[in-house]
Image (cartoon, helix red, strand yellow):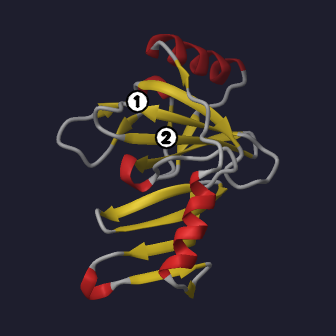
Amino acid sequence: TGKTVYVKDYHIANVIQPIYAEPESYAFLDFDNDGSVEMLANVSSDHGFFLVLHMDDAQVYGYLFSQRSMMEPKTDGTFEGSGGAAESAIFTLKLSGTQYETTELAYHNDLPESKEYRINGDSATEEDYRSFYNQYENKPNVQWIKVETTAWQKSADRVAEKNSVAYKTGD
């Protein structure tokens, strides 16, 4: 909603009880290949969320993804998202202020009654999709850094306070 919050106060909305951002690990990567590195935090993994932190015009924006909508992030910024056991896609992410946009690179639906394969928006064969997916699978995974939650929050908040920057949410 574009509101400003500090990391220690960040919580996941639209749930019965607030789930506060408690990162277990984080990684750095350039999701949108713009030369600016984002932080990806594995937030409260027992609930399954990822928080992408992106700086734009001296503001840090947060974008929240469920674990199923951002699986196996790769060092080049690509990741997999799943809509169910028989359906998934590979995406890239473009970040700008409070907005983000995903671009589908490849998609598959393996349900017998609705099989479908796409690469870059075009219809593809299962063989072509599997080849594309294997290339994706062979890309290096992000390197997760495990952290103590309180240390992560204190560090992030110190940076914010020193630079008079609060984290803005993009959701």
Residue 93: x and y in percent read 61, 59
**Nearer-the-camera pick, 66 or 83:** 83
Q: Residues within 10 Å of mark 1 (few under 14, many from 20)?
A: many
The residue under the point 55% across, 47% down is: 73
Residue 141: x and y in percent read 60, 41
Q: CA distance from mark 1 to mark 2?
A: 8 Å
The residue under the point 64% across, 19% down is: 161
Amino acid type shown at disc 1: Ala
Check disc 2 and report the residue beneath it.
51
Residue 100 visible (yes or no): no
Residue 62 vs 84, above or below: the answer is: above
Q: Earlier in the sequence, mark 1 or mark 2?
A: 1
Q: Residue furthest right?
A: 35
Residue 116 vs 104, above or below: the answer is: below
Residue 128: x and y in percent read 57, 77
Indicate the quadrant where residue 59 lies. top right
Check disc 1 and report the residue beneath it.
21
Q: Residue furthest front?
A: 127
Q: Secondary structure at mark 2?
A: strand
Report the side of 158 relative to 148 (left or right). Answer: right
Amino acid type shown at disc 2: Leu
The residue under the point 39% across, 41% down is: 49
- Are the residues flagged by discs 1 and 2 in contact, CB closer than 8 Å? yes
**Nearer-the-camera pick, 57 or 73:** 73
Residue 99 vs 125, above or below: the answer is: above
Q: Residues within 10 Å of mark 2 (few under 14, many from 20)?
A: many
Q: Secondary structure at mark 1?
A: loop
Indicate the quadrant where residue 163 lies. top right
